[in-house]
Amino acid sequence: MSDNDPFEGLDVPDDPTADLDRATQTLSVRTEERRYGKKMVVVEGFEGDRDLSDLASDLKSALGTGGTVKENHIEVQGDHGDRVVELLRDRGYAIDA
């Protein structure tokens, strides 16, 4: 880079419009009761061909629990609905209340 580049050293992402996808979609988070009374948090509403495995991995790590990605939604084991909403909002997603 040149010595007089005013943007050198700034933390600018390669694609500054990538975060717009998060801001324009609204997710829904619900808790289901599965077999044997086990709770499962389901996050739906993702648009496009987004790879959800990284986000699911981040959520599972933050919560210390298991889960999976199925079709176009994320399932997280346990009764963590409130915490999942908080984590998604921290990452810039809008949640349907």
Image: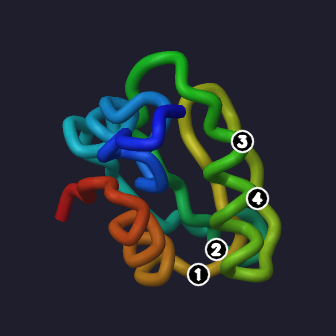
Q: Amino acid at mark 2?
A: Lys
Q: Position of residue 68 (x, y in %)?
A: 76, 49
Which numbered disc covers residue 9?
Answer: none
Q: Earlier in the sequence, mark 3 or mark 4?
A: 3
Closer to us: mark 4 or mark 2?
A: 4
What is the CA distance from the residue labelled 2 to the residue labelled 1? 5 Å
Q: Amino acid at mark 3?
A: Ser
What is the CA distance from the residue labelled 3 to the residue labelled 1? 20 Å
Q: Residues at badges 3 and 1 in contact (C-beta under 8 Å)?
A: no
Closer to us: mark 3 or mark 4?
A: 3
Q: Residues at badges 2 and 1 in contact (C-beta under 8 Å)?
A: yes
The residue to which callout 2 is attached is 39
Q: Position of residue 37 (x, y in %)?
A: 70, 77
What is the CA distance from the residue labelled 4 to the residue labelled 2? 11 Å
Q: Earlier in the sequence, mark 2 or mark 1?
A: 2
Which numbered disc covers residue 67?
Answer: 4
Residue found at x 53% / y 55%: 42
The residue to which callout 1 is attached is 79
Q: How many marks?
A: 4
What is the CA distance from the residue labelled 2 to the residue labelled 3? 21 Å
Q: Position of residue 97 (x, y in %)?
A: 18, 65
Q: Residues at badges 3 and 4 in contact (C-beta under 8 Å)?
A: no
Q: Amino acid at mark 4?
A: Gly
Q: Earlier in the sequence, mark 4 or mark 2?
A: 2
Residue found at x 26% / y 58%: 95
Q: Nearer the viewer, residue 13 or 8?
A: 8
Residue 34, picture quadrant: bottom right
